[in-house]
Image (tube, rainbow, N blue to C red):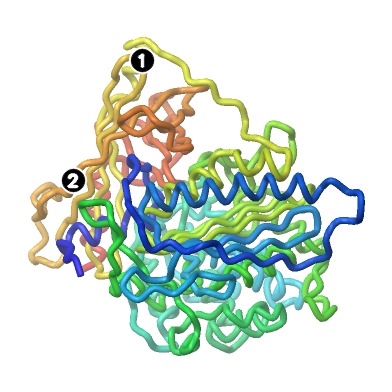
Amino acid sequence: MMTVPKLLTRCAFLRAIAGTIVAGATAGSLNSSCAAQRETTSSPAAPGDDSDADIDSLLGELEAKVEAGMQEYGIPGVALGLLHQGTDYIRGYGVTNVDSPQQVDGGTLFRIGSTTKTFTGTAVMRLVEQGKLDLDATVQNYLPDFVTSDPSVAPRVTLRQLLNHSPGWLGDYYESTGRGDDALAKYVAEIARLPQLTPLGEVFAYNNAAIDLAGRLIEVVTGSTYEEAVRELVLDPLGLSHTRFFTDEIVGFKVAASHNIADDGEPVVDTSFWEIPRSLHPTGGLISSVRDQLRYASFHLGDGRAPDGTRLLTNESLVAMRSDPGPGGTLVVELDGMGVTWMLRPSAEGVRIVQHGGNWQGQNSGFIMVPERGFALTVLTNSDGGPKLLAQLFADDWALRRFAGVSNLPAEPRTLTQAELAPYEGRYISLAIDKTGAVMETEWEIKADNGRLHVTERVTERESIDVPIPGDPTDVAETEDTPTVETRLAFYRDDYALVYDDSGEPTFSRVNFLRGADGGVACVRSGGRLYRHQGVSGGLPETGGPDSVGDLLGQLIRRLL
């Protein structure tokens, strides 16, 4: 097996979970792909109906796109589920493992990463209907000892704000707190160490720590572990027999191994990629099959009844999960905001798109629904090349236009003058804490270039374990930078830009810049994360959070020690 330097592995981990800008294509020459495994699980069209021919043509296009992406991006295996005009279509492509290949099918297990958040949200809604939780109650109503670094936030933050990603503290906190039943309780206690970056409830910034906190509230009001509660509230009632949290629950199942991409573009099995800390289960811990994912989609598109007719949620609660968005912005695509854990995405036709997805090392998932059109698509992949294929299927509107008749908001790239681009130039920083407790700094260096912006991304590990703490955070020991990623941004409206790779090919991602109180460019939001513009005064509107990476690192490193 190819060995990967420690820092490079951590940076791959950070990019996988953070949803940063997408690099160029990876060439691959997979020879292990097998013919697609196909399932269709409802009645065919009536005699004389030409919809069979239409769907056959559409499925052929979709299969060709998947198979081309597998070849180009080094993806050994893909599982796909489609709900279209009342019929389920399930497809498996390629193999589970390049070293010990088995055909991928509808029952093959993958990690679904952050799509797990919507299961946490669904469990919350069941508890809301039972009167055990209230979306607009404060966290301290259920967890009186909850503390935040900004003392004014803890008494005011609500469960709804956790679920729509607007509590404002540093959200990329991935540290393991052990495998015991107290893992979430320990994790939540550590939130007190995370700096408050934006005002409570005012700014969307993707927040894994907030969803973990919501998982802890599930534990508190049910008196059980998070995993037991979700199994009793959601998984078992829906008959999701191939969806579990722990590896000892999937012994005997067909499992898709995680693959790294070697320097030659070929996928290589990396068993270390499979592990996920128990502290992160509410935000990304589920293992599932595409058949179960499609059944889950059918539930959310339905009237709240389980397959056996048992009512799990009212239709009003299902609609509430995908309504009343919090603050908006971009998370790969443009968002109206987040509902109860669902990304709420606008379309040119005014029809709402409901979406999520998840990335973990070597495991990637996409999940999208258009409730008004009865459409759902879910795709699971087993390689670090997976996000590039998922971008084509879920961020681009190729599949949405063909199967649901909706499209992205228009976005024609503009060419701006040097003077127009100058305010966006500079250095931008975002921080995260990885599963080992190390502080990871992602830097964007942005420069104007021929009417667009050129971005150089670097990820650096900042050692946070040495004492005494330097008085100047810039003195903190740094390891060698990882290879850089080059991308370009083209504005299509004020402060919103399309992302292209360095060769000029679209990545199908969008980013947006945020203005400070003085009107200056304070941040760029990419993958839902905020990168702070260094050396720019003013910060975010009305925020009391740190404006510079030096201030933030100083706070963060001191709190972590």
Q: Earlier in the sequence, mark 1 or mark 2?
A: 1
Q: Pinpoint residue 209: horizontal percent, then vertical percent.
A: 44, 64
Task: Judge left or right: residue 222 versus residue 539.
Answer: right
Q: Between marks 1 and 2, how big is the CA–CA gap?
A: 26 Å
Q: Pinpoint residue 242: horizontal percent, then vertical percent.
A: 58, 80
Residue 297 vertical position relative to residue 240 in the rendered view, above or below: above
Query: Residue 451 got which mark?
Result: 1
Q: Nearer the viewer, residue 518 or 381?
A: 381
Q: Nearer the viewer, residue 292 or 224?
A: 292
Q: Residues within 10 Å of mark 1 (few under 14, many from 20)?
A: some
Q: Nearer the viewer, residue 248 or 326?
A: 248
The residue where tag 2 is placed is 483
Dot 2 amino acid type: Pro
Q: What is the quadrant of residue 261 in the picture?
A: bottom left
Q: Residues within 10 Å of mark 2 (few under 14, many from 20)?
A: few
Residue 208 visible here: no
